Image (cartoon, rainbow, N blue to C red):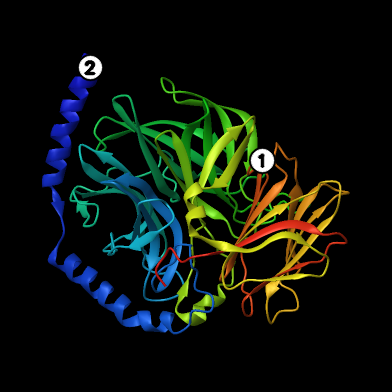
């Protein structure tokens, strides 16, 4: 106990010293102001084209969004940051956008948190220390022939204005000098801070590196806690490492998965997890359950998690690098999933929507038995609660009012598979219900998210309907179904 108190005092002194060595130059202040002016000037383009604009998913005010970052809780708000390029609808000089929420459902945009200077601001994480919100992120620097990636700090005392540390970087290189060295996820255990960072080995295998520190300024390399020893890609991005129901989970986003001979790895960019045991004394992570995909849809890549009051929450980028993003024509591109709550059941992570999303429901649009070939008409949003009879086939045609077909969502009794068919692009997997056999399907203006049973299988995909949503029962028999519209919870 005395040791912990000593470390606490030491760290308090260090944080105060670090905070005194912040800098926000006049050039940086001016750059942030110009970015906000550009966003405000360009917003009418987005507002004039709302056809695909999401109602309850985080999306950029204008421009490009990809990886979530620094999912955290600070000063009575949930904070989510994201990689952001406001000046185009493709990735560019990466900034950090910023939104906050009281309930993980209704989100408000805040000013730009980080802008690139000599460095692009790649993904990272956040931790509150002695009342200060500390960001740790990857600084990506390009030159004519190559690039390098180092780890930076930034600080805020109000959760809005962030100042970069003048002595950045705090970690200058990977243990084998790998160029790919990014996406730090920091946490505290006991008196020490720990961070996992994604990397690429010299033999082009994805891996995760672990470091520790007493003060977040000086970091010591501990170990390579996991590495691709098979077909799990050449680079592991956005690692996360946490304890769930008494077991340790390593969450990773591999690049370069190529096995498409089965239902697995149908996306080149995936998210999955490894379950094992971990020893803080040695830094040794021992795999007990091999890599499993977290989501089976078309568009689910790079994640951030947050634990608050013993509940683990997750948000992911609802996109991938090979997606088309038709909303680019409307001045924006990219979005986040709805917030999900994680639990562990045996060797499988379950994902469910946060309960607060039910507050968005209007009165039921339909509640009963949907006969074959009958249609439910929705607006741009909807939540479907479907009772699935696992002894029968189920087929729903989900499309825009002016589409012939867009999404076929079905349960195949013979194979026990749930199938999401997006105009011929099929994603599927065998469903083994734990308890409930109902589905929850969330429709927004350009997305679908499917939660099967207790959340043991999910599908996340961007879809672009022509007109308002229509749900057709294409099954041989009727389906027990409840449908709601969902109100707006994010800025247009």
Q: Where on the picture, by quarter, is residue 319?
A: bottom right
Q: Which mark is residue 3?
A: 2
Say whether residue 255 is left or right of residue 101.
right
Instruction: Give the residue at x 72% y 58%.
Output: 368
Label 1 Cα crowd, 10 Å radius (few <14 / some 14-19 / many 20+): few
Q: Where on the picture, by quarter, is residue 443?
A: bottom right
What x and y, as percent, mark residue 426? 74, 61
Q: Earlier in the sequence, mark 1 or mark 2?
A: 2
Say whether residue 76 is left or right of residue 479.
left
Q: Nearer the viewer, residue 185 or 429?
A: 429
Q: Nearer the viewer, residue 408 or 316?
A: 408
Above or below — where is 456 with respect to 103?
A: above
Name the image quarter holding the C terminus. Answer: bottom left
Say whether residue 65 is left or right of residue 31.
right
Looking at the rendered structure, the secondary structure element under dot 2 is helix
Above or below — where is 89 with respect to 246?
A: below
Name the image quarter holding the N terminus. Answer: top left
Q: Is residue 369 visible?
A: yes
Residue that numbered label 1 is attached to: 230
Label 2 Cα crowd, 10 Å radius (few <14 / some 14-19 / many 20+): few
Say whether residue 135 is left or right of residue 392.
left
What x and y, as percent, mark residue 385? 66, 54
């Amino acid at each position: 106990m005395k040791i912990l108190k000593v470390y606490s005092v030491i760290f308090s002194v260090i944080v105060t010293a670090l905070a005194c060595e912040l800098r926000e130059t006049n050039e940086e202040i001016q750059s942030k102001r110009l970015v906000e002016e550009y966003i405000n000037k360009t917003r009418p383009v987005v507002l004039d084209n709302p056809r695909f604009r999401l109602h309850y998913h985080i999306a950029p005010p204008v421009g490009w969004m990809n990886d979530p970052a620094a999912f955290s809780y600070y000063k009575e708000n949930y904070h989510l940051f994201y990689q952001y390029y406001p000046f185009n609808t493709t990735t560019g000089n990466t900034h950090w956008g910023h939104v906050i929420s009281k309930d993980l459902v209704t989100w408000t945009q805040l000013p730009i948190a980080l802008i690139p200077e000599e460095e692009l601001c790649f993904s990272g994480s956040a931790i509150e220390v002695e009342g200060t919100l500390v960001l740790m992120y990857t600084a990506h620097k390009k030159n004519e022939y190559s690039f390098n990636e180092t780890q930076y700090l930034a600080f805020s005392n109000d959760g809005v204005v962030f100042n970069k540390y003048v002595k950045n970087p705090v970690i200058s290189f990977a243990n084998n000098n790998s160029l790919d060295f990014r996406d730090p996820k920091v946490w505290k255990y006991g008196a020490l801070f720990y961070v996992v960072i994604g990397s690429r080995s010299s033999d082009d295998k994805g891996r995760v590196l672990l470091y520790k520190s007493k003060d977040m300024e000086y970091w010591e390399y501990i170990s390579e806690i996991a590495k691709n020893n098979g077909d799990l890609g050449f680079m592991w991005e956005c690692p996360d490492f946490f304890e769930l129901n008494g077991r340790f989970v390593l969450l990773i986003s591999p690049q370069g998965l190529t096995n498409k001979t089965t239902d697995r790895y149908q996306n080149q960019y995936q998210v999955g997890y490894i379950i094992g045991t971990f020893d803080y004394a040695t830094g040794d992570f021992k795999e007990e359950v091999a890599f499993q995909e977290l989501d089976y849809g078309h568009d689910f890549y790079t994640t951030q998690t947050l634990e608050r009051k013993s509940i683990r929450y997750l948000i992911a980028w609802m996109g991938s690098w090979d997606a088309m993003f038709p909303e680019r024509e409307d001045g924006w591109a990219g979005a986040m999933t709805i917030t999900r709550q994680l639990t562990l059941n045996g060797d499988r992570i379950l994902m469910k929507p946060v309960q607060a999303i039910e507050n968005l429901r209007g009165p039921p649009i339909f509640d009963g038995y949907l006969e074959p070939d009958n249609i439910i008409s929705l607006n741009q949003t909807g939540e479907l609660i479907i009772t699935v009879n696992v002894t029968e086939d189920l087929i729903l045609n989900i499309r825009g009012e002016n589409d012939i077909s867009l999404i076929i969502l079905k349960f195949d009794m013979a194979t026990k598979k749930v199938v999401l068919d997006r105009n011929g692009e099929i994603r599927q997997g065998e469903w083994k219900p734990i308890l409930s056999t109902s589905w929850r399907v969330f429709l927004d203006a350009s997305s679908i998210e499917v939660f099967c049973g207790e959340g043991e299988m999910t599908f996340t995909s961007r879809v672009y309907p022509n007109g308002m949503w229509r749900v057709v029962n294409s099954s041989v028999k009727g389906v027990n179904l409840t449908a709601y519209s969902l109100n707006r919870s994010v800025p247009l």
